[in-house]
């Protein structure tokens, strides 16, 4: 995405000359410097702790600050609706015999995570 930067100030106090254009990275997921083999489908890329392996703000799917995507709420609601339809034919039961005590944090969460048995209902 090209931006007209004429007349804007840089961090060092200089004014950017007319006719100069900047390039904004709008698809950081495909940036080789942040993600090895960015074009390949690798679900494990987002396994627990993945945020610590990349630079801060390298992955901001809906933007941030005043430029946050106005469709974020719709996208998240749509994702919840799709997941609810996909999991509808399944029943989830806690694995018997596991310690399910809560961890005293806010918000309250299971101390050792939850393990489920998944059964198809239809």
Image: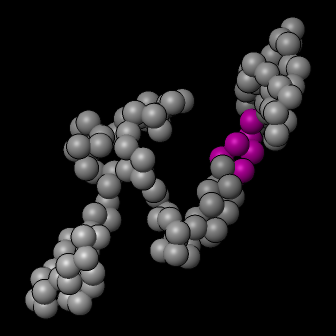
**Residue at position x 27%, y 85% from top?**
8
Could you say where residue 105 lies in the image, as x and y percent from the top left? 82, 33
Residue 100, placed above or below residue 66? above
- Magenta residues, start to end: 84-90
Where is residue 26, by image quadrant? bottom left
Q: In this view, does 8 lie to the left or right of 20?
A: right
Could you say where residue 109 lies in the image, as x and y percent from the top left? 81, 32
Q: Is residue 102 left or right of residue 21?
A: right
Could you say where residue 15 lies in the image, as x and y percent from the top left? 20, 83
Residue 100, placed above or below residue 26? above
Is residue 4 in view from this perspective?
no
The color scheme shown is one colour
**Residue at position x 26%, y 36% from top?**
36
Which of the two residues, 4 or 79, is positioned nearer the viewer here? Answer: 4
Is residue 64 in view from this perspective?
yes
Could you say where residue 20 lies in the image, as x and y percent from the top left? 12, 83
Q: Does the magenta stretch include residue 22?
A: no
Quadrant location of the N terminus in the rendered image = bottom left
Q: Is residue 6 left or right of residue 83?
A: left
Q: Is residue 8 left or right of residue 66?
A: left
**Residue at position x 30%, y 40% from top?**
35
**Residue at position x 64%, y 68% from top?**
73
Residue 48, placed above or below residue 6? above
Where is residue 4, by image quadrant? bottom left
Which of the two residues, 87 or 7, is positioned nearer the viewer here? Answer: 7
């Amino acid at each position: 995405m090209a931006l007209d930067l004429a007349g804007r100030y840089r961090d060092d106090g200089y004014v950017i000359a007319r006719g100069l254009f900047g390039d904004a990275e709008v698809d950081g997921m495909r940036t080789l410097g942040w993600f090895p083999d960015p074009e390949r489908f690798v679900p494990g890329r987002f396994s627990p702790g993945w945020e610590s392996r990349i630079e801060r703000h390298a992955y901001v799917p809906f933007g941030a600050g005043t430029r946050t995507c106005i469709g974020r709420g719709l996208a998240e609601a749509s994702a919840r609706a799709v997941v609810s339809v996909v999991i509808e034919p399944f029943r989830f039961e806690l694995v018997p015999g596991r310690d399910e005590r809560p961890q005293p944090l806010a918000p309250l969460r299971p101390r050792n995570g939850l393990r489920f048995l998944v059964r198809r209902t239809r």
